[in-house]
Every structure is written in structure tokens, then in C-alpha cells.
Image: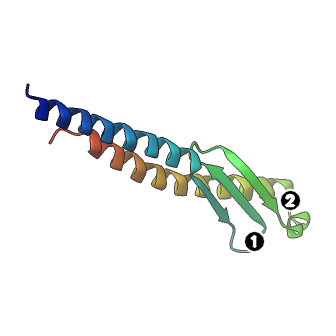
């Protein structure tokens, strides 16, 4: 292997490492919010699908606990789906970097 080949190999490895670090940072930054149409419930989740924020409008005081729990679950699920799409884009980009030419 020539010096030029070795330099190219090291450069490619460094580029992949940089892309990996960038992707990991982007995955940690993913957040999505979803609000019900009436704004009664807003849920925020991170890239792992964990609930990171929940906002409840005063209008929920007129709802049954069962209905409120359904809205919270639904809004959280919708937000998690949004983060899943974003996570998929980041991972697809990362995977393409590591695919053989």
C-alpha cells in the first residue's frame, strides 16, 4: 500500500468518524411536539420516544380522567412518530456513509 493510499484510507476513516459524531449529536437533539386540535394536550418527546414535556390546557378540567389519559397517550404517540421519522433520516444518512462503494 502506497503512502497516497494510506493517506486516502486515513482521510476516509476520519470523515466517517466525523459523520458518526455529528449523527450522534443530532440524535441527542431530536425533539418533537404534538398538540391536539383543540390544544387541550401538548406532548413533547425526545429521539428515544421518552416524554420530555407535557402541557395541559384548563379545558381538560371539564373532561373525564379517562378521556384526558387517552388524549395524553395519543398526543405522546403522535410526537414519538414524528421523532421516529427524524431519527430514521439521521440513521439512513449515517448508514449510507458506512456502505461499501
Residue depicted at x 60% and y 45%:
49
Q: In this view, does 30 lie to the left or right of 57?
A: left
Q: In this view, does 39 lie to the left or right of 65?
A: left
In the rendered view, tell whether residue 37 sits above or below residue 47: below
Q: Which mark lies nearer to you, 2 or 1?
A: 1
| The quadrant where residue 100 appears | top left
* Closer-to-camera residue (7/40): 7
* Vertical relation: 70 (above or below) 2: below
Which of disc 1 and disc 2 is earlier in sequence?
A: 1
Q: Nearer the viewer, residue 12 or 72?
A: 12
* Circle 2 SS class: loop
Furthest residue in direction top, as rendered: 1
Q: Name the residue under label 1.
A: 39
Q: Residues within 10 Å of mark 2 (few under 14, many from 20)?
A: few
Q: What mark, if any, has residue 88 been given in the picture?
A: none
Q: Which of 9 and 38 is in front in this view?
A: 9
Q: Residue lying farthest bottom?
A: 38
Picture coordinates of residue 96, whole percent (x, y): 27, 46
- Could you classify mark 1 by the number of other residues whose Cα lies within 10 Å: few (under 14), some (14-19), or many (20 or more)? some
| Colour setting | rainbow
Which quarter shows the C terminus?
top left
Dot 2 corresponds to which residue?
A: 64
* Residue 77 picture location, percent across and down: 61, 53
Establish if 42 lies above or below 15: below
Amino acid at each position: 500500500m502506497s503512502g497516497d493510499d494510506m493517506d486516502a484510507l486515513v482521510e476516509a476513516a476520519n470523515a466517517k468518524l466525523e459523520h458518526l459524531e455529528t449523527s450522534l449529536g443530532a440524535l441527542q437533539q431530536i425533539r418533537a411536539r404534538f398538540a391536539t386540535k383543540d390544544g387541550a394536550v401538548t406532548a413533547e418527546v425526545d429521539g428515544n420516544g421518552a416524554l420530555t414535556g407535557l402541557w395541559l390546557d384548563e379545558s381538560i378540567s371539564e373532561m373525564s380522567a379517562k378521556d384526558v389519559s387517552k388524549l395524553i397517550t395519543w398526543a405522546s404517540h403522535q410526537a414519538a412518530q414524528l421523532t421516529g421519522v427524524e431519527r430514521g433520516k439521521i440513521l439512513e444518512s449515517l448508514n449510507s456513509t458506512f456502505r461499501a462503494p
